Image (cartoon, rainbow, N blue to C red):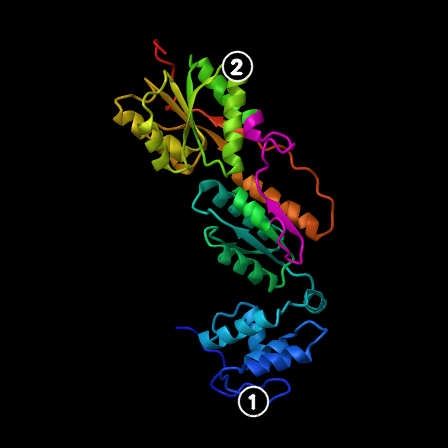
Amino acid sequence: MAIEEPGSVPEAVPGGEATTGPRVARSTLRRVSAGRAGRAATIYDVALAAGVSHQTVTRYLNGFAGIRPATRERVEKALKELDYRPNLAARALNSGRSQRVGAITHELDQFGPSKILQGATAAARDAGFVLDIVTVDLARPDVLNEAIEMLRRHDLAGVLVMSSTDTMSEALATADFGVPVYLGAEPDDTSGTDPSELTQFGFPALFDHLVGLGHHTFLHIAGPAEWSAARNRSRAYSTALAARGLSSAGVLQGDWSARSGYEAVMAAPDLAGATAIVAANDQMALGAILALTERGLRVPEDVSVAGVDDIPEAAYFSPPLTTLRVDFAAQGRAAFSTLLDRIRGEAHALEPALHADLIVRRSTARAPASG
């Protein structure tokens, strides 16, 4: 049962009579707006416009869950119409520096983003901060705008934007939160930054392993092109092949899901002589293994399969999956560390390159004699 705020008794509002919170007339909003001309709205202005006490407004801004829905609606309407913004400087003088950081993220059903957020949360906790997490659905722009507005109303030390896709990065790159912000997104290898750890270390190690087993013809299952991580992995695949004088027999398109890996392999008219498939993540590798089996091919005797990420289930696939282990939690910790330096006004030391470790299991074996 929701906890009711003290609303059964009249609530005093500054400059007016007590009220039990009836619907606020439009004239009240006009009167408040006129009275505050030339200055920012205060919680007392909001309280007057909403017909509640300033304590109720404060409880709403602090996230108190026990406010009655009708009261909450009036407060939200007044906040929006008066364009209320919290006075962060005044709050800091009263209570010291905020120890709360906002985090906007999406795609938490994917392994990488969820582990990155876990790492950021752990780093925040170690530094004495609380991470307030807001997840958004990019299919609904109104939800993204609401998330930005909600964070702007809270007394935050900073905002961490955890982005996986171009759409998310573009939507939030210019958002004004009024506090230090760090956009944590995997840089595109073509952006002029140092190549990703997968390009530098992971894929070369994986292809050394596969070539050492006698494989020379490969297929790639790529992730969705809107993800910089997917583009980087596809480039890492191509770069590793080119460095060994090899070429790809083809690229199949997936969307990170096991279903997409399965459908991509099942739909391929033939494997173009490929004796090894390298999927951009472990879930698509899982789907590929099932599809190969249903096509009458054995893994790894006929076709070897490898993935990327080393999800916890990868060791229990049938057969257990050879993969590249990526330390996503370290990426999350590094992202929060960068934001914390910005909050403190300190220069941020460059993070060392994060290595992707090759984990060899039974899904890869010597290429068949005819391969």
Residue 79 picture location, percent across and down? 58, 71
Q: Which mark is residue 244?
A: 2
Query: Circle 2: is it few (<14), some (14-19), or many (20+) Cα within 10 Å?
Result: few
Quadrant where the C terminus sits is top left
Residue 178 picture location, percent across and down? 67, 58
Q: Specify the amino acid type for callout 2.
A: Arg
| Residue 368 can be seen, yes or no | yes
Q: Main secondary structure of the magenta part?
A: loop
* Secondary structure beneath label 1: loop
Residue at 65%, 67% (x, y): give it.
Answer: 86
Q: For the residues labelled 2 and 1, say whether their Cβ atoms are less than 8 Å apart.
A: no
Point out the stretch of residues depicted in magenta: 173-200
Residue 284 picture location, percent across and down? 39, 33
Task: Find out whether residue 309 is within the magenta segment.
Answer: no
296 or 353, which lies in front? Answer: 296
Quote the CA–CA distance across marks 2 and 1. Answer: 80 Å
| Residue 314 can be seen, yes or no | no
Residue at 53%, 71% (x, y): give it.
Answer: 76
* Residue at the outermost bottom position: 17
Residue 196 picture location, percent across and down? 58, 31
Q: Specify the amino acid type for callout 1.
A: Ala
293 or 81, which lies in front? Answer: 81
* N-terminal label among 2 and 1: 1
Residue at 74%, 51% (x, y): give it.
Answer: 345
Which residue position holds label 1? 18
Query: Circle 1: is it few (<14), some (14-19), or many (20+) Cα within 10 Å?
Result: some
Q: Which mark is residue 344?
A: none
Task: Find out whether residue 195 is within the magenta segment.
Answer: yes
Quadrant where the N terminus sits is bottom left
In this rendering, position of residue 19 left or right of residue 364: right
Examine the rendered structure and indicate whether residue 134 appears above or below residue 300: below
